[in-house]
Amino acid sequence: MKKTHIALLFLLAGAFVALASMLSRSAEHAGFDVAIDQPDRVVRVSGTLVPGKAVEYNPEVDPNSFRFWMADKSGQQAQVICIDDMPYDFEKSEEVVLTGQMKDGIFYATDLLVKCPSKYVEEDLTKSSTPVSET
């Protein structure tokens, strides 16, 4: 075999190993019920903040974590400890997607994605619907 063929085989093997590693670390999208039933499994849970329950964040004590309550898509609630910085306007989020594991009844999130309300408001197009005259 030529040296280029051998190098190409090593490159393809490395790409295959990297892809397999990424796929093995990816989390399955589930709810809190799966996280409770299988605490060793990393899952991705999406839901909303529970209204009326405060977000606990004390940057003087621990600036890299915060606590809150979240309800998943089925309505099941769980307390969450997020090991990450708290995003700006977190309390205003429409949807939260967490990646982590359940331990002792608390969901420990290592990754957080927040969907916030749109900054842009649709314009009312019916305000000025007068046609422009051509001259």
Image (cartoon, rainbow, N blue to C red):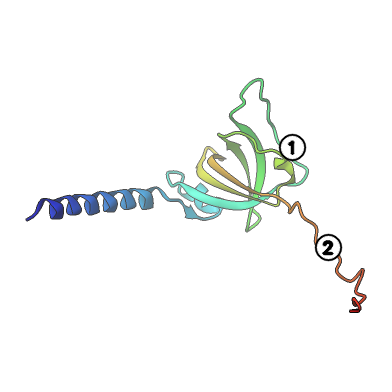
**Residue at the spot 52% in from the left edge and 51% down from the top edge:** 44
Residue at 59%, 53% in the rendered image: 46
- Mark 1 is surrounded, within 10 Å at the Cα level, by few (under 14), some (14 to 19) or many (20 or more) other residues, namely few
Which quarter of the picture shows residue 74? bottom right
Left or right of 78 on screen, residue 117: right
Amino acid type of the residue that numbered disc 1 sits on in the rendered structure: Ala
Q: Name the residue under label 1.
A: 54
Q: Vertical placement of 112 versus 64: above or below?
A: below
Mark 1 element type:
loop
Residue at screen point 45% across, 48% down? 38
The amino acid sitting under disc 2 is Glu
Quarter of the image where the C terminus is located: bottom right
Q: x%, y% of residue 30? A: 52, 55
Q: Give left or right: position of 31 versus 133.
A: left
Counting from the top left corner in percent of width and height, residue 86 is at: 64, 35
Residue nearer the viewer, 21 or 79: 21
Q: Can you identify the residue that label 2 sits on?
A: 123
Select label 1 or label 2 by which is in front.
2
Quadrant in which the N terminus is drawn: bottom left
Where is residue 110? Give x, y as percent.
52, 39
As rendered, which of 60 and 116 lies closer to the eye? 116
